Image (cartoon, rainbow, N blue to C red):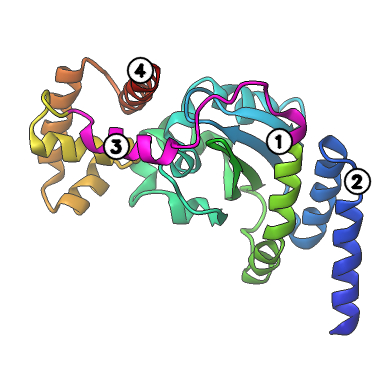
């Protein structure tokens, strides 16, 4: 046991002695790959008012367009990790299975984007960076590999303090001059979430809209509300018409625009 702890401390030291930014991120990547062998890693910073900023990734040129460029073009809006950042999920290591709504395979995000990634599993560290910014460090394995074992998850969980320090240091190096949103993000998002659609939608349509904003499908929303999927579909069609949107991603884009508009008032 003493030898294992000594090795663990030595490996952590090798990460933390690197200069903050790309060098330290490369060292962190090597360490995490030694612990649990993720096939690829990517670091995104979410600020709640636009496409996430990618600070680091290990994707080959052939994979980068779908995992990074395409993701930033719009699918991120319905990514459970992005929604977790937007709605105040606690910092920690999460799996897609834990954050995704029930019947994830029926959601717009899965059907239009996620299934094309052909992943066996996606884990992500969520780390608060201050000033409303949050980092998500993806760890993914593609479909031809096994999912992460319980032992590997345990090791990755133990690495959380080191990961958080490295990500915060990387953001301190790369942070833009003007933060995109302010310290009261969680409160403003929560307030806007609760009032979204009021005065335009019925009470039930507001409930359906809030579930759609959280990434739910018709089926999972029906389970939450204990009504038939067909009834959810009727409410969904009605609220889309009233709000003049045509899809779940457009609904979330409207929510973000309204959030930004209230901030600028």
| Residue occupying image coordinates x 88% and y 62% | 11
The residue pinned by badge 4 equals 261
| Secondary structure state at the residue bearing disc 3 | helix
Q: Quadrant of residue 254?
A: top left
Categorize mark 1 by other alpha carbons within 10 Å: few (<14), some (14-19), many (20+). some
In this figure, which residue is indicated by the disc labeled 1? 171
Q: Read off the magenta span.
A: 172-197
- Of the numbered discs 4 and 2, the one sitting upstream in the chain is 2
Q: Which residue is mark 3?
A: 191
In 3D space, how far apart are the residues under numbered discs 3 and 4 (Cα atoms)?
13 Å
> Which of 234/49 is in front?
49
- The answer to if 247 sits in the magenta stretch is no
> For mark 4, does the 10 Å Cα neighbourhood hold few (<14), some (14 to 19), or many (20 or more) residues?
few
Check whether the beta carbons of the residues at disc 3 and disc 1 lie within 8 A of each other. Answer: no
Q: In the rendered view, does 131 fall on the left or right side of 171? A: left
Q: Which residue is mark 2?
A: 18
């Amino acid at each position: 046991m003493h030898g294992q702890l000594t090795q663990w401390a030595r490996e952590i030291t090798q990460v933390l002695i690197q200069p903050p930014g790309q060098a330290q991120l490369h060292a962190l990547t090597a360490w995490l790959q030694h612990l649990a062998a993720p096939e690829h890693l990517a670091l995104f910073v979410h600020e709640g008012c636009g496409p996430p900023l990618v600070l680091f990734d290990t994707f080959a040129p052939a994979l980068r367009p779908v995992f990074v460029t395409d993701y930033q073009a719009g699918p991120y809006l319905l990514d459970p990790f992005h929604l977790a950042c937007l709605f105040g999920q606690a910092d920690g290591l999460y799996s897609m299975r834990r954050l995704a709504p029930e019947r994830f395979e029926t959601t717009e995000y899965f059907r239009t984007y996620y299934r094309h990634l052909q992943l066996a599993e996606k884990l992500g560290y969520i780390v608060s960076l201050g000033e409303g910014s949050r980092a998500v460090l993806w760890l993914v394995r593609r479909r031809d590999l096994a999912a992460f074992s319980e032992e590997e998850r345990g090791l990755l969980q133990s690495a959380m303090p080191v990961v958080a320090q490295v990500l915060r240091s990387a953001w301190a190096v790369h942070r833009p001059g003007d933060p995109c949103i302010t310290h009261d993000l969680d409160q403003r998002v929560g307030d806007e979430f609760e009032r979204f659609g009021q005065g335009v939608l019925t009470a039930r349509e507001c409930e359906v809209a809030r579930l759609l904003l959280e990434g739910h499908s018709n089926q999972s929303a029906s389970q939450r509300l204990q009504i038939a999927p067909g009834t959810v579909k009727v409410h969904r069609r009605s609220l889309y018409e009233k709000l003049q949107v045509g899809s779940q991603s457009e609904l979330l884009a409207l929510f973000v625009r309204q959030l930004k508009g209230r901030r600028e008032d």
